[in-house]
Amino acid sequence: MNLRTFVKVGSITNLSDARFCAGFGVDLLGFDLNPNSENYISIEQANEIMGWVAGPAFVAEFGNMPVDQIVQLQEENKFPFVQVNNIDHANELKQEGFQIILAIQIASESDIKVLAQAIGNEYSHIIVSCDAPQLIPAIEETLATGSETTLIKGYDVELSQLDHIIQVQPFAGIELKGSQEEKPGFKEYDDLADILEALEVED
């Protein structure tokens, strides 16, 4: 299957989600490898899932883990992409030769300044999420200045907004999230399925 826009699905914790998303032709699948995260899975679990999935490229989501730990894990496992939440970590890891995805969570005015700095750098992608709806105009104003990096939208990704997101710059794609299985092999997809189905390219 083909989708109408670039799609990353993060926080994959189970094979059901991974296969479901791969079947729709998503571009990236991310695994949260930060032990302090509620969506954490081990490297061993991630490798097992990846062994059963073909199509998407894989992302190691490290969050705010120390750079030295990230470098060690990445050198041992060689994920195609490394995702971090800290711009200084992103710049340091970029110097190591890794393909970097910088995830920026906008919650305050200081985060807008980080975003403004980040879009002047070259990464593989920047994912922009937002916890503060009142700052969305400031996000849009900042992004309107242009970006050296492909921008992925991680906020207000709703079924009713898909056509607008696809047609209007500056975002080149969206980020969705996986979820926990109710029990092994049993999963309700709901919103994730609705969005992916709406993005399918009609034959």
Image: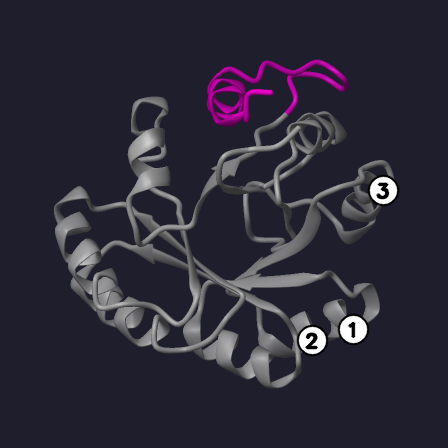
Q: Is residue 133 left or right of residue 18?
A: left
Residue 165 sits in quarter: top left
Quarter in which the N terminus is drawn: top right
Q: Identity of the amino acid at label 3? A: Glu
Q: Which residues are magenta?
A: 181-203
Task: Please state which of residues 8 and 3 is positioned toward the viewer in this rendering.
Answer: 3
Q: CA distance from mark 2 to mark 3?
A: 21 Å
Alpha carbons under labels 1 and 2: distance apart: 6 Å
The residue indicated by pointer 2 is 71
Q: Residue at x 39, y 72 (%)?
A: 148
Of label 3 and label 1, which has the lower sequence position? 3
Residue 77, image x, y percentages:
81, 63
Mark 3 neighbour class, 10 Å CA radius: few under 14, some 14 to 19, many 20 or more: few
The amino acid beneath tag 2 is Val
Secondary structure beneath dot 2 equals helix
The three-letter code of the residue at mark 1 reads Glu
List x then y, in percent, for residue 157. 36, 34
Residue 195 is a magenta residue: yes
Q: Which residue is mark 1?
A: 75
